[in-house]
Amino acid sequence: MIDFTNGSVFKLAACDPAEIAASVQPLFIEGEQIMVAAKTFRDFVVFTNKRIIAVNVQGISGRKRDFSSLPYNKIQAFSIETAGTFDLDAELELWFSGLGKVKLEFKGNFDITYLGKLIGFYVL
């Protein structure tokens, strides 16, 4: 399981879902589709219409991967923080039943408001 308490583990930037779809689609259930995708140099997170999947690429070759599935129905609360003038990063904090807090940081040009609206749609 990924250590989500350290937000700097993921300093994510928006990416085209087609770039990473092949890596996560074998995990999808019927009707599941990617809504938003973001990545670092190697790691990535996808927000589907059912859950959040965080992928930690490990090892030199990158063949070993840790897939953490975080279902929306286990989210008890969430918070978004937009980028500012001096603090250029946006943040998403999610509190999951049985897991605790998950924190993800995004580069300032990421549309965190849309992501908050998307999560709200599936959680509320």
Image (cartoon, grey):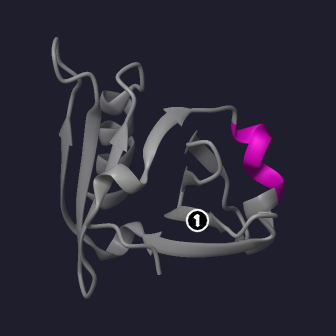
Residue in the image at 43% along x and 50% along y: 10
Residue 48 appears in the figure:
no
Q: Residue at x 30, y 29 (%)?
A: 113
Q: Secondary structure at mark 1?
A: strand
Question: For mark 1, what is the residue?
Answer: 56
Q: Is residue 101 magenta?
A: no
Image point (77%, 51%), residue name: 21
Is residue 16 visible in this depiction of the protein?
Answer: yes
> How many marks do you count on the picture?
1
Residue 108, placed above or below residue 28: above
Q: Which corner quadrant of the image does residue 27 belong to?
A: bottom right
> How would you rate the neighbour count of disc 1 (Cα within 10 Å): few for under 14, some for 14-19, many for 20 or more?
many
Q: Position of residue 104 (x, y in %)?
A: 34, 51
Is 67 or 119 nearer to us in this picture? 67
Q: Is residue 19 magenta?
A: yes
Q: Position of residue 76 (x, y in %)?
A: 19, 70
Instruction: Answer with left or right where residue 123 lies relative to residue 67.
Output: left
Residue drawn at x 35%, y 22% as measured from the top left:
108
Question: Is 76 on the left-hand or right-hand side of 6?
Answer: left
Q: Give the percent coordinates (x, y) of residue 122.
A: 38, 56
Direction front: furthest residue: 60
Image coordinates of residue 3 in percent, x first then y, are 37, 72
Residue extent of the magenta highlight: 17-22
Residue 36 image-quadrant placement: top right
Q: Residue furthest top?
A: 85
Which amino acid, mark 1? Asn
